[in-house]
Image (cartoon, helix red, strand yellow):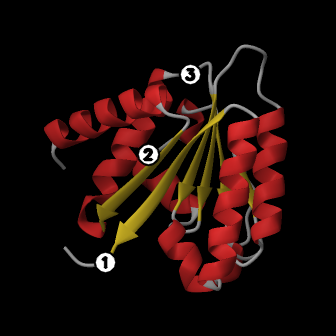
Amino acid sequence: MSTTLIDGLKERISSSIAMYESVGIVLPGTNYPDLLQALFGCVKEKPNDRWVYITATRPFDNFMKLFGDVSQYPNVTFIDCISRSSGIVRTDEQCIYIESPTMLEKITMEASNLLTQTPEGAEKYLILDSLTTLMIYNDPTLVTEFFYQLLNKARSEEVHAISLVVEEGE
């Protein structure tokens, strides 16, 4: 894991999201762990802001293994779309479990509900990980519609959105 790469990614993410309401990141799968480190570096640098992390790529349990005690990130709540469909049944204060990544409307409702709980004056961030994975479980047309609706809702509610597309191979 290259610290220079992670620091560079973190800097680019921070400056891009400050400039634009929505940022799309396309990356090879081999750089995915570095991107996660960079994203959570951004989360840690903005402890008073609200972050919602929608994950269809990794179960919440993997984030706990990767980052250890996720309570060190009290400003982020996960929406895990993959654990329940894999048969993992658990509860956690920092995670909402969705039954399946095919439940796109429920994902939107849960994200919206979490973001309305943002304290006054705090910035709001939404990370969608990843469009690539959602297309495995859903018709691409439905994912496109979901994505447009999610981004329009985010824009209308002044939420900064970060969308990931992970490419296969190296």
* Category of crowding for the residue at label 1, using alpha-carbon neighbours closer than 10 angstroms: few (below 14), some (14–19), many (at least 20): few
Sequence-wise, the earlier of marks 1 and 2 is: 2
- Please identify the quadrant where the C terminus is shown: bottom left
Sequence-wise, the earlier of marks 3 and 2 is: 3
Estimate the spatial distance between the alpha carbons at disc 1 and disc 2, rounded to whole Å.
24 Å
Spot occupied by residue 129 in the image (x, y as percentages of width and height): 52, 59
Mark nearest the camera among 1 and 2 is: 1
The residue singled out by tag 3 in the image is 47
* Category of crowding for the residue at label 3, using alpha-carbon neighbours closer than 10 angstroms: few (below 14), some (14–19), many (at least 20): some
The residue singled out by tag 1 in the image is 168
Please name the residue shown 68% across and 19% down the image: 122
Compared with 144, 85 (above or below) is below
In the rendered image, is residue 158 in sight? yes
In the rendered image, is residue 88 in sight? no
Amino acid type of the residue tagged 1 in the rendering? Glu
Sequence-wise, the earlier of marks 3 and 1 is: 3
* Category of crowding for the residue at label 2, using alpha-carbon neighbours closer than 10 angstroms: few (below 14), some (14–19), many (at least 20): some
- Seen from the viewer's position, the closer of residues 83 and 110 is 110
Q: Left or right: where does residue 162 sit relative to residue 82?
A: left
The residue singled out by tag 2 in the image is 67
Quarter where residue 81 is shown = bottom right
Spot occupied by residue 114 in the image (x, y as percentages of width and height): 79, 41
Amino acid type of the residue tagged 3 in the rendering? Pro
How many numbered marks, from 0 up?
3
- Seen from the viewer's position, the closer of residues 113 and 158 is 158
The reply to whether the C-beta atoms of the residues labelled 1 and 2 are less than 8 Å apart is no
Q: Secondary structure at mark 2?
A: helix
